[in-house]
Amino acid sequence: MTTDIQSNLEAKNGAYAAEFTKGHLPLPPGKEYLVVTCMDARIDTAAAFGIDLGDAHVIRNAGGSSRDALRSILISEQLLGTQEIVLIKHTGCGMLTFTNEDAHALVQKNLGPAAAAEIATLDFLPFPELDQAVRDDVLFLQKQNTIPESIAVSGWVYSVETGRVRRVV
Amino acid sequence: MTTDIQSNLEAKNGAYAAEFTKGHLPLPPGKEYLVVTCMDARIDTAAAFGIDLGDAHVIRNAGGSSRDALRSILISEQLLGTQEIVLIKHTGCGMLTFTNEDAHALVQKNLGPAAAAEIATLDFLPFPELDQAVRDDVLFLQKQNTIPESIAVSGWVYSVETGRVRRVV
C-alpha cells in the first residue's frame, strides 16, 4: 500500500534526482559546522539559514534541544571535524505550550497504561521561556567536557512570523 | 566576536527574510506527517523529499535513528496530530564507519578521561548494514506501545550519489 505522503515523496524526489548534480560531495561538512534546531514544519533550514548542500550537519528535534542532540553533536565533532555549533530555537514553538505532566497525562489518556508505563521516565524537555531556553542550551553545551572551549557556540531565535533570525548569545 | 559562519547566517537569512511571505502558517504540520532522517550535510530535506514549508516535522540526528528520535516523534504524534512516519537513511552514512568502542576510544584519546567518563554509558547508535538498519528502525517504531498501528511507518534509503530515494519497507 502506498499512502499519499509516500506517493508525494516518490514524485517530488524523482524530479529532484533528475536534476541532481552534487553526487560527489565528501562526507564531512565542507564548512565544518553544525546547526541544532527544531523539527517545526515552518523551518526550511537550507533556505532560512543559508546552508548550501554539503556545508553543515543539521540536527533537528522537538524544541531544538542541545541535550537531546548531544550524541549527534559528539559524532559530528569527534568523527567528522565540526568546529562550531549554531543553536537556533524559534518563536511559536510547541515546547512552550505544555509541561512534562501534561504530556504524560495525554499518553495515558490516548494510548493507555502500557504506553504510559513504557515512557514513564521520559523527559519531553519542554521549556517555559524562549530566550532563557536558548541561553540554558548554550550553557549546557559549554559545560560539557566533551565539547572543548575551542568550539564556538552561539544561540539564536528564528521568527516563524518574519523569517528572520536574532542572536541571543 | 562574530565568526564567518555567524556572518554567513546573518547575511543569507537577511535575504531570505526580505522575501519571506509565509508568516501565517499554523503550528501543526499541514500534511500531518513527520520525516526522520540523518544530519548528513549532503541532504536537503525540503528539496530532496518534496516537503513544502509547513507540511511536515523534520527530525534529524546522526544516522536518522528512530530510537534517538522517539521523544520528538511522541510530541509530534500526541500533541501535534502527526499520522504518518517516513524514515529515511542514506548511502555513505558515517554511522557505517565506526563502532561504539571506536567512538569511546576517540573521545578518551582526544579529550581525556573526564570527557570519556562523562559519556561512558552513551550508545552512539552506529550500524553495520544500511538496509537492515532501516528495517530495524521501522520495526522498533512499530513495536512501541506509544505508536499505535494506525500510524503508517515506511523506511527508505536516499542515495547521496544520485539524489534518489528507494523504498526498503
Image (cartoon, coloured by chain):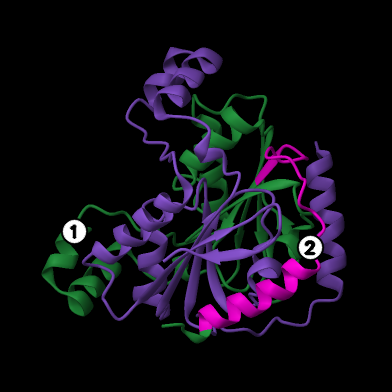
Chain colours: A green, B purple
The correct choice, above or below, for B146 with respect to B101 in the image is below
To which residue does mark 1 refer?
Answer: A118
In the image, A17: left or right of B156?
right
Q: Nearer the viewer, residue B86 or A144?
A: B86
The correct choice, above or below, for A75 with respect to B132 in the image is above
Could you say which disc has been placed on residue A64 in the image? Answer: none
Task: Give coordinates of residue A68: x percent, y percent.
Answer: 44, 48
Chain under label 1? A
Q: Tell me the quadrant of the picture where the N terminus of chain A can be found.
A: bottom left
Question: Which residue corresponds to the image point at 59% horizontal and 37% vertical from the top-left?
Answer: A76
Q: Nearer the viewer, residue A81 or A84?
A: A81
Q: Which amino acid type corresponds to the residue marked 1 in the rendered image?
A: Glu
To which residue does mark 2 refer?
Answer: A20
Task: Give coordinates of residue B48: x percent, y percent.
Answer: 68, 66
A9 drawn magenta:
yes
State the extent of the magenta-drawn residues as a range.
A5-34
B146 drawn magenta:
no
Same-chain check, marks 2 and 1: yes
Chain under label 2? A
- Per the image, label 1 sits on a secondary structure element best described as helix
